[in-house]
Amino acid sequence: MKELNDRVVIDPAIRFGKPVIKGTRVPVEVVLGRLAAGLTYKEVMKEYEITREDILAVLQYAVQYLSHEEISLVS
């Protein structure tokens, strides 16, 4: 298991190695998707039985991931 931050991990045995909230099977992408769809963090917390700190860790992971992304313009 690889810890990406204190609450987000990758484990090949869980969700095919996709990043999940530690101690759960809740994928980072699901949390981000639900927030992007307009759910409040409280609604996401209740739906997936996670904490506010879990959601903040997911957002932190997304920022870290995107900050390393390289974009190439194709013309």
Image: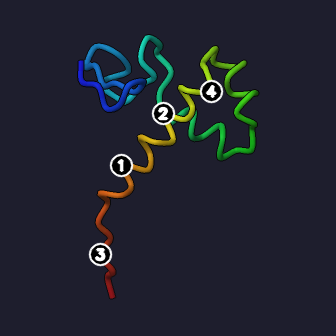
Badge 2 local density, few (<14 within 10 Å), some, or many (20+)?
A: some
Query: Which sits earlier in the primary sequence, circle 2 or circle 4?
Result: 4
Badge 3 local density, few (<14 within 10 Å), some, or many (20+)?
A: few
Give residue 37's mark. Answer: none
Point out residue 39 in the picture as x, y percentages from the top left corner. 74, 37
Asked if residue 23 is positioned above or below residue 68 in the image, the reply reads above
Residue designated by label 3:
72
| Distance between mark 3 and mark 2 Cα atoms | 28 Å
Q: Name the residue: 36% across, 58% down.
A: 67
Badge 1 local density, few (<14 within 10 Å), some, or many (20+)?
A: few
Residue designated by label 4:
52
Query: Which sits earlier in the primary sequence, circle 2 or circle 1?
Result: 2
Query: Which sits earlier in the primary sequence, circle 3 or circle 1?
Result: 1
Q: Amino acid at mark 1?
A: Tyr
Q: Amino acid at mark 2?
A: Ala
Q: Amino acid at mark 3?
A: Ser
Query: Which sits earlier in the primary sequence, circle 3 or circle 2?
Result: 2
Residue designated by label 2:
57
| Distance between mark 4 and mark 1 Cα atoms | 20 Å
| Distance between mark 2 and mark 1 Cα atoms | 12 Å
Secondary structure at numbered mark 1: helix
Location of the N terminus (image quadrant): top left
Give residue 65's mark. Answer: 1
Please tell me whether mark 2 or mark 1 is closer to you in this view.
2
Location of the C terminus (image quadrant): bottom left
Q: Are marks 3 and 1 in contact (CB under 8 Å)?
A: no
Point out residue 66 in the picture as x, y percentages from the top left corner. 39, 55
Q: Is residue 12 left or right of residue 47?
A: left
Q: Are marks 2 and 1 in contact (CB under 8 Å)?
A: no
Secondary structure at numbered mark 4: helix
